[in-house]
Amino acid sequence: MKKTAIALAMATVLGVAGTAMAANPFTDVPANHWSYASVSKLAQAGIIEGYGDGTFRGNNSITRYEMAQMVAKAMARSDKADAAQKAMIEKLAAEYSAELNNLGVRVSALEKKTDNVKITGQARMRYQDFDADSSDNNSSNAQLRTRLWLTSTVNDDWKFVNMIEDIQDLKDNGTADTDVFMARAYADGKVGDVAIKAGRFDYKPVWGAAFDDDMDGLLVGFGKDLKVNVFAGRMAVNTKGGYDADKTDAYGAELAYNFGNSKKWAAKAGYYYVEKTADASANNDVYEAGVSYKFDKNWAALAQYIGSSEDFDDTGKDGYYGKVFYKGMNLAKKGSWGAYASAYDIPTGAGLNTTFDLDTFGDSGIKGYEVGFDYAMLKNVQLHVAYADGENQLGVDKSMAYTYVAMYF
Amino acid sequence: MHVAKKWFQWCALLVVVLGFVAVNPAEAALPKSMWGTAPKVAVLPVVNVANDDPAVTQIVLEKTVEAFRYPEFEMISDDVLLPVLTKLNYYEAAKNGPDKQLLEEIRKQSGVDMVVMFFVEEITQNTILGEEAVEESRVKARAMGVYSWKQPVSLSADREERADYAVVGDKGAINLFKRTINKFVGELKKI
């Protein structure tokens, strides 16, 4: 008892005792424990050295620490094991993971409790060329944008996500480089069946005809077949109709419903109340509703209405967005690809910050069309090529050629 | 008077003892098994009707071995369990999900205190129409534990998550599955 107590004290000082979940490494493993039988079998098979008669210790007591040492030897010789023996070694490695970690043996198949922060990223190299009515308004950009996501697991239901971003200007020798900054930070999780997102996060309600950018606020989602999202916060909107992008609060709700088991039909709708905190006369209601349909495994389409209660700049209050898809790129599958064609007419009041890459007007809505293509050149490597032509609601014309290669890691 | 005083003292002592027990009820204790104080646990092979990905079984194995670690619990070896499963035609009997009677029969025939089973119905990760590089992961699974000392525990999960591919990569569904199994195991090991 005294010896065990001293050993336990040493283990605690040295940190060998580990977390509350880890067993005392100096606990005796009984001869009838499943791991004892497994190690005996591995000894008989010659994966671990036994005694001269091929047995392993017989019924002598052995501590968890000593057992872990045997498992470490088995892991080192696992290349000589058959499939069943390898499975046995994996199970042993899981059972004695804490002791193996303390022995300095890397158990590669297991998650370490300290690996709660996962880092993923995207590096996107793009070229974008705009031709306007007036050649004075032509422009192009070439940039390398790097994004890192740090996803920290808080518990089984919650995570915290940070996104760090940096943009390097490749066209003008870095004159338009940005600093590295924390572009997004939000908590993402569930309370019961209610999903919650809070902080600064990207938000694209319905299909993005009204808004597709960052929002500071709270998003609450619930429902199974009929999914409901309710949000409140500050949207990063374009400056239009007197909106101040820094002070535009928005509240709203989004609905999505998949019809039937086949999920070929889906309907979406959204309502957003957008207010400029300093000038109530610029407050606006934006609403959109549409359907999507999967014809077969290759073809799909969506069509929606979008409207605004206010008619900014006498440009109208009603609009639409339609898109046809053929196949679809899957980044996990090299060689997969998809193509699309879309047409849109978004009134000034409804185009808060649209998803359309042509929409660099900043205000006054947009109407036009776009065709594009996405291809998974390699696993986790995307090629995107697109062409768009259109104008804002005031008749300022622009066309765009856009291509990028993005790596995901 | 002397007798009355004795009776009064005994009654007072009884009241004190009963009161002490009521205020400090005995802590729930792990049942004793044949071999010692740790309950013997049989973790049944995973029934996975969602796919044939060996990672699914591996994840359940890792989580259960970590949760039912000796000396708090004592998992039994496959040598004891597999003959019982063969005799009861386990894979056929469990193909539609956990069955209380089946698990109870396994528990009795293998001589254990606790049997747990995991049934995986769906693990999918798909892109979303109209949203390039956004993945929707879905996990549907059930689990059941039958015990010698308490009522069976039946669990189910139907979880969906949507995230940028850049955030989850191609492992969004597997990570969601790991968290689901974590929750299951946490509930199943409660005394």
Image (tube, coloured by chain):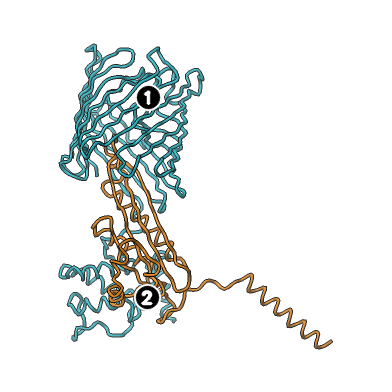
* Placement of A208 over or under A263, stated as above or below: above
Q: Nearer the viewer, residue B58 or A16?
A: B58
Separation of marks 1 and 2 at Cα, in angstroms? 69 Å
Residue drawn at x 30%, y 50% is B173
Q: Tell me if mark 2 has few (under 14), some (14-19) or many (20+) residues whose alpha carbon lies within 10 angstroms of its own.
A: some
Residue designated by label 1: A306
For the residue marked with disc 2, what is the amino acid? Answer: Phe
Image position, residue A73 (x, y; %): 22, 72
Helix, strand or loop at label 1? It is strand
Identity of the residue furthest to the front in this view = A260
Chain B: its colour in the image is orange
Q: Position of residue A298 (x, y in %)?
A: 20, 37
Label 1: how many Cα within 10 Å (few below 14, some 14–19, many 20+): many
Q: Is residue A14 visible?
A: no
Query: Furthest residue to the bottom?
Result: B2
The residue indicated by pointer 2 is A26
Q: Chain of mark 2?
A: A
- For residue A344, what is the image quadrant? top left
Task: Give me the disc on residue B128.
Answer: none
At horizontal 41% and vertical 51% (from top left) the residue drawn is: A157
Mark 1 / mark 2, whichever is N-terminal: 2
Residue A208 in percent (x, y) is at 34, 30
The residue positioned 69% from the left and 76% from the top of the image is B16
Near-viewer residue (B183 or A202): B183
Q: Quadrant of the C terminus of chain A?
A: top left
The quarter of the rendered structure image containing the N terminus of chain A is bottom left
* In front of the other: A107 or B78: B78
Left or right, residue A123 beside residue A250: left
Q: Quadrant of residue A372?
A: top left
With B97 as the anchor, is A40 left or right in this view? Answer: left
Colour assignment, chain A: cyan
